[in-house]
Image (tube, rainbow, N blue to C red):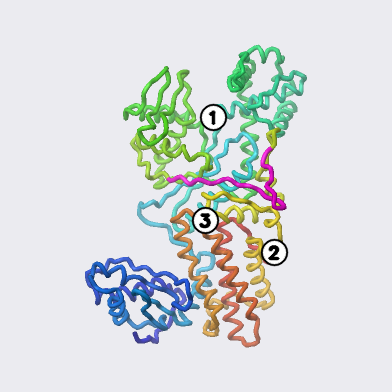
């Protein structure tokens, strides 16, 4: 294969270019295999070149020929290329490509030319999973968000940003559970604490909401409306059945509140909902997590969607009546037991509203809906998918990602996550201790399906052992170099990169070139943690180069080339950190 004198363009894509060369050779060697998939991977050992293809081994059975012989024929037919310095055949028939220095460094120009859009894909055309909805967090608005919710928030936000960057139209949604028993429990909890303020104490149920925020809401009601909602404790207790069943007693207290307060119950219910939902919104906004839609569960009842969903299941023959209740035959779809969708008193279950909600998602035209749930919801997946299938929907359009639990560690010891008083470590407390950036990055340091040990001491440390500090320090270092240079960064876009000649520079360029493919792969796998790992590797390559080579050397050509490489590295760090919701400090 003879070298070509053509110039390497700034938008050069090595993997695409090499695939084109192999495709041309394939047309001569095996014309009938023109549609064969051509894979090019980076070898683990640098001595094996920049890219390797196993196409010869893929075709060996079809062509009934030894793969090394196929590889030799392909290499002979490869067109000349200015990007390829050497082609070798290794092992059983791998074709290894070594790029020229110009081809290796061309990514610098590509990064500087694209800027914040480097790695971004254009909006996808067609209907193949183009419009996506990511629903995440969706915690009941019955108390502050805790550190477990924080991991779901960080994961969901990063996944949505990653998918949007990869070319999908993404809607970020929070499902507000503003109907049902849990909100009633919160309302009666606040009301009972309110009665205590007027010396009308009712024994507080152990299964009601215990946190101090409940007392705060009771005080808010007192300040706003005085004693308007006071009823004697005796009158409240008269409505509660004498039973050892704590759930039955709690339900009795809820009924007492509704009966005694009448229309005023709606105010108490509305107040606690609005207070907790506002707190949740503020917490998430401060965490850098934003939603396009806050979808009300109550709206499903108000618009008749829940009734229509159950009717659709009845029509399909998957509902039966037992003891006056309507049951969905979820065992027919892999669930461990059938589920009630409407109780004998006519009240729909939470499961019924969940079915209606997911059917509504599909009605809104999303090609795929992605739910981010806590790991304890694993058993819920088959029954929801089963209900969708039973209602005539394509359940394959629902993807569920489970987020495992978080454990906090301080001084090597596990931190207690809750107390008997109902208080627990909130997301806001965690953010106050370690900062938003550490929270967002540390939450991404494990795959979401793996339990996460969150080291508080490490997250606060200013050392290279702290991964977020390590990555941000690379960005700050580059900013410092550019400030010392005090030149026009725009001029570096067209810099001559030929002075970049050492292996550390080539390694850094290779890492930059991986970014677009990394984005696509992480989006396909729903794996934003892969981006966090990549940024750690990129920072490592930069620090290694920076510690070995001076950037601001006397030679103007070398200085400009190295400044361009540093600037390109900063740009990719910015692009990646932005997707993870982590800031990019200019000094540290």
Q: CA distance from mark 3 to mark 1?
A: 33 Å
- Per the image, label 2 sits on a secondary structure element best described as loop
The image's mark for residue 528 is 3
Residue 262 visible in the picture:
no
Q: What's the mark number on residue 179?
A: 1
In the image, what residue occupies the spot 53% across and 82% down?
A: 497
For the magenta stretch, what is the residue range?
A: 399-418
In this rendered view, identify the residue nearer to me: 232 or 226. Answer: 232
Mark 1 and mark 2 residues within 8 Å of each other at the beta carbon: no
Q: What is the quadrant of the N terminus in the image?
A: bottom left
C-alpha span from label 2 to label 3: 24 Å
- Of residues 345 and 88, the one nearer the viewer is 88
Q: Residue at left 67%, top 47%? A: 414
Q: Relative to residue 271, is residue 39 depicted above or below? A: below
**Residue 251 location (% of width, % of height):** 59, 21
Q: Residues within 10 Å of mark 1 (few under 14, many from 20)?
A: some
Label 1, label 2: how many angstroms apart (C-alpha)?
Answer: 47 Å
Q: Is residue 551 magenta?
A: no
Q: Nearer the viewer, residue 273 or 406?
A: 406
The percent position of residue 556, horizontal first and vertical second, equals: 61, 86
Along the horizontal axis of the image, is 317 left or right of 561?
A: left
The disc placed on residue 463 is: 2
Query: Is 406 within the magenta?
Result: yes
Q: Residues within 10 Å of mark 2 (few under 14, many from 20)?
A: few
| SS majority, magenta | strand
Quarter of the rendering occupied by the C terminus: bottom right
- Sequence order check: which comes first, mark 1 or mark 2? 1
Q: How many numbered markers are drawn?
A: 3
Question: Circle 1 — which element?
Answer: loop
Question: Could you say which quadrant of the image residue 58 lies in?
Answer: bottom left
């Amino acid at each position: 294969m003879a070298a070509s004198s053509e110039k390497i363009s700034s938008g050069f894509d090595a993997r695409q270019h090499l695939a084109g060369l192999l495709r041309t050779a394939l047309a001569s060697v095996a014309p009938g295999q023109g549609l064969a998939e051509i894979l090019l991977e980076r070898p683990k050992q640098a001595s094996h070149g920049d890219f390797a293809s196993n196409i010869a081994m893929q075709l060996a059975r079809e062509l009934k020929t030894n793969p090394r012989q196929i590889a030799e024929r392909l290499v002979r037919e490869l067109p000349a290329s200015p990007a390829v310095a050497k082609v070798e055949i290794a092992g059983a028939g791998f074709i290894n490509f070594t790029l020229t220095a110009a081809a290796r460094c061309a990514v610098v120009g590509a990064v500087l030319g694209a800027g914040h859009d480097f790695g971004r894909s254009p909006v996808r055309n067609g209907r193949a999973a183009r419009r996506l909805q990511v629903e995440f967090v969706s915690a009941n608005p019955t108390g502050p968000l805790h550190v477990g919710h924080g991991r779901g928030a960080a994961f969901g936000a990063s996944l949505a940003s990653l998918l949007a960057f990869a070319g999908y139209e993404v809607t970020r949604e929070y499902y507000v559970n503003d109907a049902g028993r849990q909100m009633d429990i919160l309302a009666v909890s606040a009301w009972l604490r309110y009665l205590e303020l007027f010396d009308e104490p009712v024994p507080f149920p152990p299964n009601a909401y215990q946190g101090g925020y409940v007392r705060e809401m009771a005080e808010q009601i007192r300040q706003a409306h005085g004693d308007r909602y006071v009823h004697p404790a005796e009158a409240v207790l008269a409505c509660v059945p004498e039973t050892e069943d704590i759930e039955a007693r709690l339900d009795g207290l809820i009924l007492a509140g509704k009966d005694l307060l009448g229309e005023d119950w709606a105010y108490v219910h509305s107040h606690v909902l609005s207070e907790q939902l506002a707190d949740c919104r503020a917490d998430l906004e401060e965490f850098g997590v934003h939603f396009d839609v806050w979808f009300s569960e109550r709206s499903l009842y108000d618009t008749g969607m829940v009734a229509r969903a159950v009717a659709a299941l009845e029509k399909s023959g998957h509902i039966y009546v037992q003891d006056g209740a309507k049951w969905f035959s979820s065992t027919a779809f892999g669930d461990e037991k059938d589920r009630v969708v409407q109780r004998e008193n006519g009240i729909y279950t939470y499961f019924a509203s969940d079915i209606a909600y997911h059917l509504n998602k599909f009605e809104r035209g999303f090609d795929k809906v992605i739910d981010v749930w806590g790991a304890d919801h694993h058993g819920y997946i088959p029954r929801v998918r089963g209900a969708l299938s039973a209602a005539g929907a394509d359940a394959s359009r629902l993807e569920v990602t489970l987020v495992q639990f978080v454990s906090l560690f301080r001084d090597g010891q596990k931190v207690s996550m809750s107390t008997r008083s109902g208080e627990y470590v909130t997301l806001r407390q965690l953010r106050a201790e370690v900062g938003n950036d550490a929270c967002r990055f540390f939450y991404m340091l494990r795959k979401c399906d793996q339990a996460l040990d969150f080291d508080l001491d490490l997250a606060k440390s200013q050392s290279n052992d702290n991964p977020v500090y390590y990555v941000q320090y690379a960005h700050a270092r580059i900013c410092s170099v550019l400030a010392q240079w005090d030149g026009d960064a725009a001029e570096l876009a067209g810099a001559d990169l030929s002075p970049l000649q050492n292996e550390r520079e080539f390694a850094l360029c290779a890492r930059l070139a991986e970014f677009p493919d990394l984005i696509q792969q992480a989006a396909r796998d729903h794996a934003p943690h892969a981006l966090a790992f990549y940024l750690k590797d990129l920072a490592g390559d930069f620090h290694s180069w920076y510690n070995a080579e001076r950037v601001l050397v006397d030679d103007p050509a070398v200085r400009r080339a190295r400044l361009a490489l540093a600037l390109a590295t900063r740009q990719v760090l910015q692009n990646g950190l932005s997707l993870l919701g982590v800031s990019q400090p200019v000094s540290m």
